[in-house]
Amino acid sequence: MFKQKLALNRLEKEIVRYEAAPVEKGMILFYGSSGFTRWKPFWGHRPLEEDIRRKDGSPAAVNHGFGGSTIEEGLHYYDRLVKPWEPRAIVLRFFPNDIAFGYSPMEIVYLLAQFCNRARTDFPGVKLYLCDAMPHKKFINNALWQKMAHQYNELLKDYCDSNQDCVYVCQSAWPGFYKNPEDAGDYSKIRTDIYIEDEVHLTQEGYDIYRDLFLSVLDDIL
């Protein structure tokens, strides 16, 4: 087991707010860190639930992004934020905060695998979408971060390739994040105009691009 690198209840207030909302079963559950957390009107953006809908226009998704969370926190809150919703598919997005708290790429993928095992047991037939390391303007010139991101992406893809119920979501190579299509996948050549002042989170234009990525990835289940 891993030593505790953070207080696992530090985001408890956000969890309580989610628990106060009606439970919607059988949806696509988006679960992860602040890229999902901020996909809400509170942060000045259209809600994820409005952007990700079925092809007939009906609701398809529930957004349970919380704080700048890690996968260990995602596991910690699984019984409260995932299990009651009985999702038909789960989109998992972690990595940046995990690295900041000292987890290695291998540890993150190991913990993601534990999450997936729990989901398979609880929701037979569930489809799992695992997102690679998201591009961020802040790390354009950070060679160490990029090295860890590529290592994480390789490990995550290997895991997805070995499990038929998993889909590898390649955020790092989505063309919309790059000015030139041939640069897709190069973290040092991402667009810089779709990030807010903190150089980590997306503008509304950035979320429009993010929406298009997930509409493409989830096309066969929408």
Image (cartoon, rainbow, N blue to C red):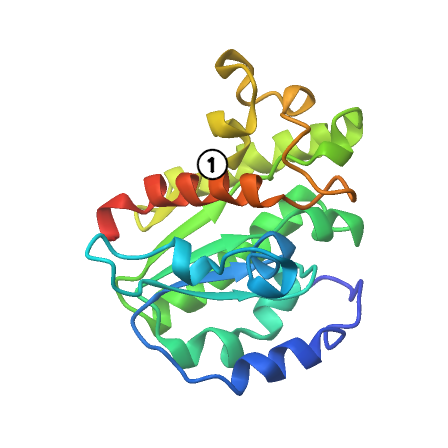
Number of disc labels: 1
Q: Residues within 10 Å of mark 1 (few under 14, many from 20)?
A: many
Q: Is residue 78 above or below residue 212?
A: below
Instruction: From the viewer's side, name the closer residue of 147 and 92.
Output: 92
Residue lying furthest left in this view? 56
Q: Where is residue 104 in the image (x, y as percent from the top left)?
A: 71, 45
Q: Where is residue 55 in the image (x, y as percent from the top left)?
A: 22, 52
* Residue that appears at 35% across and 44% down: 215
Quadrant assignment, res 216? top left
Q: Position of residue 49 (x, y in %)?
A: 41, 62
Q: In this view, does 137 lie above or below 44?
A: above
Q: Give, as a three-letter code, the residue at label 1.
A: Lys
* Residue that appears at 47% across and 36% down: 157
* Residue that appears at 42% across and 85% down: 22
Position of the N terminus by quadrant: bottom right
Q: Where is residue 48 in the image (x, y as percent from the top left)?
A: 46, 58
Quadrant assignment, res 83? bottom left
Which residue is tagged 1?
A: 157
Residue 165 is left or right of residue 90, and the answer is left
Instruction: From the viewer's side, name the closer residue of 203 and 107.
Output: 203
